[in-house]
Image (cartoon, rainbow, N blue to C red):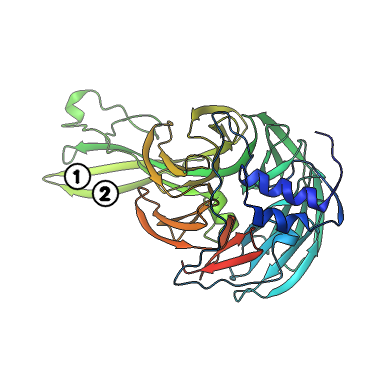
Amino acid sequence: MTTQPRTKNYLTAALLAAALTLLSALVSAQTASQTASQSGSSTGTATIDSTSSTGTGTSSSTTKQTAATDSTAVTSVGLNDGVTSMAADSNGNLYASLQYTNKVVKLNGAGTVIGTFAVGRNPTGLIVDNNNGGLLYVLNNADNTVSKLKLDGTPVGTFQVAGDGPVHAALYGGVLYVACERSNTLVRLSSVDGTALGSTDVGTRPVWVVVSVTSTKYYNYSTLDSGTASCLDCGPSPTVDCVDCTPPPDCVDCGTAPPPDSTTVDASTTTDGGGTAPPPDSTAASDTTFSGAASTNSTNSSSKTVTTVNIYVSCNKANEVWKVGSDGTLAARFATGRGPFGLAINSRGELFVACFWDGVVQRFNSAGTVLSRSAVGDGAAGLISYGGSTLAVISNGANSLTRLSLSDGTFISKDLVDRSPLIGAATPSALWVACTGNGTIAKRSL
């Protein structure tokens, strides 16, 4: 789509229309008063598209609703600046991209602006890398570029994105995985110098990316007759160096291998939210031998750890999630509810998908089978996983923040926030939600 000049009033309407099918007359009146001219992309927002392939969404009341435990922090970051993305560093600072002023602001834990950084046009996505001395990556939707800065705002470089409309990204293993909403592609580029690494065609309007990193330990196991030479059952693949357990006299009972142990991390959360860095992007084996006692026999087991990296992309207008390997190869694609938006991963490798038009969060296994469905309120949009056990869901139409169990999606609690929340971030001490309807950033307890 060709980028063309437009008024700030038009940009504001585009941002809100992308989040809901209709907004109330109150929000329309607020946005109609903005008349300053602004150049940018006609679709370059981080909000959901206002149409769906199966129907039209329902607008909700825009009356301000305040929770009993309200702790809203009103800052200078608000509707007139067009907050499109948020991220946090490990020191509890918050970063917000401002669509209309082409800037990123840095806030401390009290919500006070402590820095303002110039970036490219129409910034719509942020990644904070707490490693490598602390780095900030900003997706500039209208320029098709990524701005790389230090966390104090010092510019490091600007990378060209080989796609149209970068809107959301994840960082893992020195690679940026960038969803481009207008070219319908997932672009890979080096986070070091911006070198293009490849591009994969995905479904219509990709809007969110997460990286799932699974470390699986496979075991080989044998029970040996006391005093005999070592004999190791080769077990299931992948195997480590082993000796065939024949002839039978050499081995009383070769036994069977214990089931593999798997642990998954959401690598995009750890890089964005300030957690522990995930394991290296490698399939190199780490072999270890363990010993124990079993009756009169000795038990020996050997293990091999294999790391698997998958990238999940929510395709908002296709009502699908695409599963792609770290090299860009398509692994799977599966149907979701209407308007898939935010994504998150738990430690079992299960995928959570916020379905905007259905007001639910679906939980899938890695094969794409639906495991659960949690109702959260109209306009389920941004997802924030934190603490290893909790998933926060931002509902744009319901003006709410719902906490679910990251294990199985069961309900924990819900807070009301100000109008039209869409995205947010977690610091070590609080949840932050950008409420575009009346220009506030809501601060809530974890």
Q: Mark 1 points at which residue?
A: 298
User: Residue at 59% across / 71% down in the picture?
Assistant: 91
Task: Please state if 265 lies on the left or on the right of 175 as rendered.
Answer: left
Q: Name the residue under label 2.
A: 291
Residue 424 in the image: above or below residue 339: below
Front residue of 68/284: it is 68
* x and y, in percent, of residue 251 in the image: 19, 31
Q: What residue type is labelled 1?
A: Ser
* x and y, in percent, of residue 419 in the image: 58, 59
User: Residue at 26% across / 43% down in the picture?
Assistant: 300
Q: Which amino acid does label 2 sit on?
A: Ser
Cβ–Cβ below 8 Å for labels 1 and 2? Answer: yes
User: Residue at 35% across / 47% down in the picture?
Assistant: 408
Earlier-in-chain disc, 1 versus 2: 2
* x and y, in percent, of residue 190 in the image: 72, 44
**Separation of marks 1 and 2 at Cα, in angstroms:** 8 Å
The quarter of the displayed image where residue 220 is located: top left
Residue 198 at least partly seen: yes
The quarter of the displayed image where residue 194 is located: top right
